[in-house]
Image (cartoon, rainbow, N blue to C red):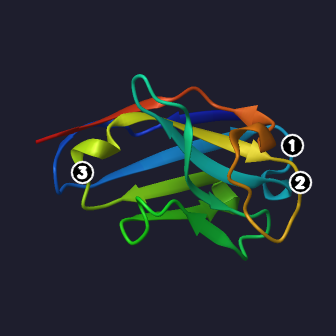
Amino acid sequence: VQLQAYGGGLVQAGGSLRLSCAASGRTFRSYAMGWFRQAPGKEREFAAGINWNGGSTDYADSVKGRFTISTDNAKNTVYLEMNSLKPEDTAVYYCAADSIQGLRVRVRPAHYNYWGRGTQVTVDY
């Protein structure tokens, strides 16, 4: 599966952005989808994920209550709605696909088989 993330940009603290990740190739609904982020000098970290059938979501504590992950299977697209953005949310955001059809979202980058190119999100003070 090929993934393409877009929608990043520069926003002021307290603002909102919606990231999109378009998938092509194998049936989109076969995969769990995750959003990860990587700030300069830091390791890539899990932000949000949704399992393959949409029945389970998970969020990092740092984004819980502010970020929402969702999918549109008809469009083969996964979204990350980001509200109340903070400067510490500044990072390159990546979408990824996990081919394991589990009940729960996996949070380690090593679990994800496919990655898209990242999109930069910058939150200004």
Above or below, comparing residue 125 to residue 80 in the picture: above
Q: Is residue 79 left or right of residue 12?
A: right
Q: Residue furthest top?
A: 41
Residue in view at x 39 percent, y 34 percent: 91
Query: Of callouts 2 and 1, which one flags the residue occurring earlier in the amino acid sequence?
Result: 1
Above or below, comparing residue 7 to residue 15 in the picture: above
**Is residue 39 among the parts visible in the rendering?**
yes
At label 3, counting other C-alpha atoms closer than 10 Å, the crowd grade (few under 14, some 14-19, many 20 or more) is some
Q: Secondary structure at mark 1?
A: loop
Above or below, comparing residue 85 to residue 52 in the picture: above
Residue in view at x 51 percent, y 59 percent: 60
Query: Of callouts 3 and 2, which one flags the residue occurring earlier in the amino acid sequence?
Result: 3
Q: Position of residue 93 (x, y in %)?
A: 48, 37
Q: Position of residue 17 (x, y in %)?
A: 32, 51
* Residue under pointer 1: 26
Q: Nearer the viewer, mark 3 or mark 1?
A: 3
Q: Secondary structure at mark 2?
A: loop
